[in-house]
Amino acid sequence: MRQRPIGAALLAIFVAIISAVHLLQAFTGALGDPRALVLEHVIVAVLGLVAAWAIWTGKRWAPWALALAGVTVAALIVSLGPLLRMNAQERAGLWTGAATVFVMTLAGVWYVRRRVASPSASA
């Protein structure tokens, strides 16, 4: 059995926690948030949990799963403006937040490609 790099374990745990928070937001927001936002939270949570599992188990497709999860989170952040009918001042930081998530996702994908997903990893 191959030893899991500590960084990969920490990344998988981080992604799983963030995904659980999105799932919690979907459940708590179901009463007052727009349905599209609740659905986005569920999608982000599921994709994130799949990515966390793929990283944890060393699947060769883990970088792709992480990339998809991260891009979906960035899209959720950008969509908050129209979904919550924010004014221009309130929307000002959404693109910066989405770009930050995107850059962090790229770093995570780079790391996972180098440390987790190797030809010897299971499919």
Image (tube, rainbow, N blue to C red):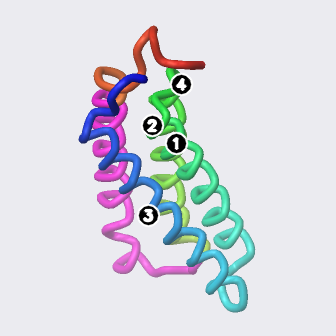
| Residue 96 is inside the magenta segment | yes
Asked if marks 1 and 2 touch (Cβ < 8 Å), the reply is yes
**Separation (CA) of disc 3 from disc 1:** 12 Å
Q: Residue at x 33, y 50 (%)?
A: 99
Q: Earlier in the sequence, mark 3 or mark 1?
A: 3
Q: Earlier in the sequence, mark 4 or mark 3?
A: 3
Mark 1, residue position: 51
Q: Please state the horizontal and vertical placement of residue 112, each as a whole percent of the image.
A: 35, 30
Residue 27 covered by magenta stretch: no
Say whether residue 67 is visible. no
Q: Which residue is mark 4?
A: 61
Q: Which residues are magenta?
A: 84-111
**Amino acid on which the number 4 mark rests in the picture:** Trp
Q: For mark 2, what is the residue?
A: 55
Crowd class of label 2 (few under 14; some 14 to 19; many from 20; radius 10 Å): many
In front of the other: 64 or 100: 64
Instruction: Tell me the amino acid under the disc marked 3.
Output: Ile
Sequence-wise, which precedes: disc 3 or disc 2?
A: 3
Helix, strand or loop at mark 2: helix
- Give x and y (percent) for residue 114: 29, 21
Helix, strand or loop status at disc 4:
loop
Amino acid type at image mark 1: Ala
